[in-house]
Image (tube, rainbow, N blue to C red):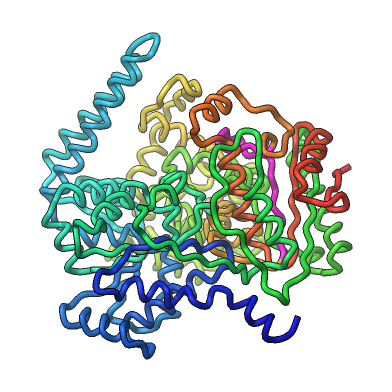
Amino acid sequence: MNVQATRDANDRDAGVVEEICQLLTKPSPQSFFLFAGAGSGKTRTLVEVLRILTGIVEHESGQELARALRLFGRSIRVITYTKNAVAVINGRLGNNDLVNVSTIHAFCWELIAGYNDDIRDALISLKSKKLEEDKLESAAKAKGTSKTDLARHEEMMTDIESYRSTTIFRYHPDRNTYGSGALQHTQVLDVTAWLLLSRPALQKILRDRHPIILIDESQDTMKGILDSLIELSKPSERGLTLGLLGDHRQRIYMDGHADLPSQVPEDWAKPELQMNHRSQQRIVTLINKIWEAKLQGRTQKPTGVKQHHRSEKTGGTVRIFVGNASLSSEDKVIKEQWCAGQMVSHTSDSAWSTNGYQLLALEHKLVATRGSFLSVYTAMDLIDPNAAAPVGSGENKGPAAVRFLLEGLLLLTECADSDGKINEFLATEVLRQTGAIERLPDNIEMRRVRSAETLDAISKCIAATKNRDATVAEVLAPILELNLFEVDSRLSDAFDDKSPPPPPPVPRKEKETIEARMRRGWCRLFSSPWGELKRYKRYLNGESELATHQVVKGSEFKHVMVVMDDSDAGGFLISYDKLFGAKELSPADKSNVESGKETTVDRSLRLLYVTCSRAQESLALVLWAVDPIGAIASIKGSKWFSENEIELIS
């Protein structure tokens, strides 16, 4: 291929930036949905559009829009999914006072903060509606409304009365807040969606501030918020232009629309990015085949743009390894290392022999099992399911109630050498950072006694960690007994409560109260091995060699291994045995297919697409199947892989 042809092939998306700019600068601006697949340069396209629309780049229509924005004190609002994505866009865009980039949570709170009466009305309305729906659902059951149902209804009514008596509501976009008037993340999104459709004054405020709103990763944006903004962008409403950027094939959260393209109004423009600049040809071909596949149990339409690889990226290596799911987790880890060794010979790349590849799993529980911190992860998920797992780039610090364990106590236990001798300088620094120094008495003699007690407590704490069988409770006890740190009252109260954990609810038959769930979580945490806590913290920080599809959202790696193991994942929403034909569809799956609802096959296929599309050069898929031979037969029939790309793990 000659140089001109190569350039033309690689630049097939070159006109998309100008197309979007024309849409937004017309006398009557037009909303749009930009389809931007994996590795298509979505962020680069977004930044180029913003540079033109704000007058940084020479462009007549863009400079006119920039002058108008500045004249009326307005700005373009960009909403994205994580703080890391905000930082990336701001970093590429530079200092620009005509663009306001934030997460969806920060955007919502900025819009509704301080409107306490309106927030109260929204919370009461939303909870009352949920209560009525729950009552109808409970009454329709074969055995009628149960005691558990009644207890849950009582909780909802208590919440409603609590809202009525709250005068000020509090929230922080980057962490959970607690106490009277504290709002959680999902509540802020729900309240904002409700108010946007119910309060004309708020609609006017939004239009006056941000006549153009661009939403990145729109496939994962909460349905309520997205629907409200789409409604406000209708031509009859005037004044608000909406741009959605994303790829419904990469939806990984349940909050987003199952089929976003079907929700886009017909009068919207639909520009497309067709290139995949990230991956080699073999990987691009595979992800195209994955999405186009006609599978039993699939209901989601294979809509979307077929991607093209860059003309110079004509290589790439793909293999799928299939093993028996009945092996122990320890044996599976050994076999996965064997798969990596096979990739060395297939690629002639030593990165596969030196852990120079990214290992991806499809479920947090699977990562916790492989990483040997399942007990602690399970406990954290019971205590606060919204904060137990990492959300990308180390943004999540874990449940707020256990923050002392994950930060202060872990640091304190590391202030000793291999013989257990305390490094008093390091320990003093930890005490200073955590505020414990300020809690020491002013009286010199009392301070001396307290310091000696503190040193003794730290010694006991560190000594406990030297026991391989030590539990979290055993390490924590000396510190809490001395009241050395100011810890969250929920942690200290739970530790003092010696009652046994309540029994877990019967799956799909009972709905557990929040209090019972959290009590089970605390009991599980205190009895968990201490060593698991450090491994869990590394996972939260993004320092583990393991990651899930949520954590690597938007990331790319030269070499990727994807581990698929339904037995260790322990969930029911995803099943790779069903996807690869090693297991029959359940009656629920068949019912969902008949009614056109999303199935486990739909979800599994999407997450497989996301993880495979992270790879640049080589990709290894490891499937632990209940029926390996049957799975291999099904894989061969799919035509996703050639014969020499399929290997049985012996």
Q: Nearer the viewer, residue 262 or 93?
A: 262
x and y, in percent, of residue 122 in the image? 18, 43
Residue 173 location, quadrant: bottom left
Question: Left or right of 280: which side holds 480?
Answer: left
Looking at this rendering, what residue extends furthest in the top direction?
A: 143
Q: How many numbered discs?
A: 0
Figure quadrant of the N terminus = bottom right
Q: Quadrant of the C terminus?
A: top right
Would you say residue 282 is visible in this rendering?
yes
The answer to whether residue 69 is above or below residue 302 is below
Q: Quadrant of residue 558?
A: bottom right
As drawn, 44 above or below 464: below
Residue lying farthest bottom?
A: 58
Residue 368 belongs to magenta span: no
The residue closer to the viewer here, 43 or 151, is 43
Residue 358 shown left or right of residue 637 in the figure: left
Give residue 458's position: percent from left, percent from top. 50, 56
> In the picture, residue 420 is in which quadrant?
bottom right
Who's the residue at 63% across and 44% down the image?
Answer: 366
- Position above or below: 537 against 573: below
Q: Which residues are magenta?
A: 559-576
Which residue lies at the image location 34% right of the left edge and 68% below the top edge?
78
Judge whether 494 appears above or below 544 on screen. Answer: above
Q: Who's the residue at 85% across and 58% down the image?
A: 341
Q: Residue at x 42, y 39 (%)?
A: 495
Q: Is residue 436 visible?
A: no
Whole-percent x, y for residue 195 in the image:
19, 49
Find residue 513 and report its horizontal and vertical position in percent.
36, 28
Closer-to-camera residue (189/419): 189
